[in-house]
Amino acid sequence: MVAMRRQHLFAALVLFGATVAVSVTADGQQSAFRSGTAQALPAPPGALPPLPQVSFDPVRPLPVVQQVYEFAARHPEVLNYVPCYCGCESVGHKANHDCFVKSRAANGRIVEWDTHGLGCAVCLDVARKAMTMFNQGMTVSDIRAAIEHEYAGRTPSHTPTPMPPKAGTKG
């Protein structure tokens, strides 16, 4: 049963994205930067790299995990302003985005996923709620306020996430 689940997980991960994303600058150097900055560009259209292989089953159904990782890749302008409440600030995460994206190329292409989100229900649930609210047309400020309202009283800590820029200003 476990072997079959791993085979299905592997097949789904391969289907999720077949290209490995690495950006090369004009001088031939690989360009990547740590996620978690408000200036991170969204991943360009097209295939994303496959999710990393892990030795455990994801804590949420694979389609949910895939949707959340893709949302994190495509919408850093949302998740870079949404705190995470699982305690991951202790490993250097600055926002919920960091639970999924470890590094990006200068053009926004995903260089490396963070495996933390695969095994953390809090990370996945926070990002999924943010994704749902974003898809309903809510502003990033309203999304953050709703997430804070739901999670802030339930956990002792959260990531040191910057506030979203005011409407009409660039992030």
Image (tube, rainbow, N blue to C red):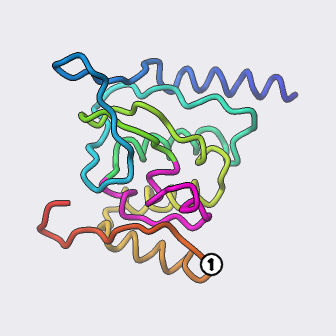
Specify whether 95 is left or right of 10: left
* Residue with the mark numbered 1: 156
Q: Is residue 64 left or right of residue 112?
A: right
Question: What residue is shown at x 77% (from left), y 28% (from top)?
Answer: 5
Q: Tell me the residue at 42%/28% (across/down).
A: 48
Q: Residue at x 58, y 26 (%)?
A: 13
The correct choice, above or below, for 158 with respect to 98 in the image is: below
State which quadrant residue 137 falls in: bottom left
Using residue 40 as the reference point, say whether residue 84 is left or right of it.
right
163 or 16, nearer to the observer: 163
What is the count of numbered marks? 1
| Residue range highlighted in magenta | 77-99
Residue 104 in percent (x, y) is at 35, 37
**Mark 1 residue type:** Pro
Q: Is residue 50 magenta?
A: no
User: In the figure, is residue 100 to the left or right of 153?
Assistant: left
| Residue occupying image coordinates x 41% and y 63% | 133
The quadrant in which the N terminus is found is top right
Q: Secondary structure at mark 1?
A: loop
Q: Position of residue 51 (x, y in %)?
A: 55, 31
Q: Position of residue 120 (x, y in %)?
A: 65, 53
Q: Nearer the viewer, residue 47 or 105?
A: 105
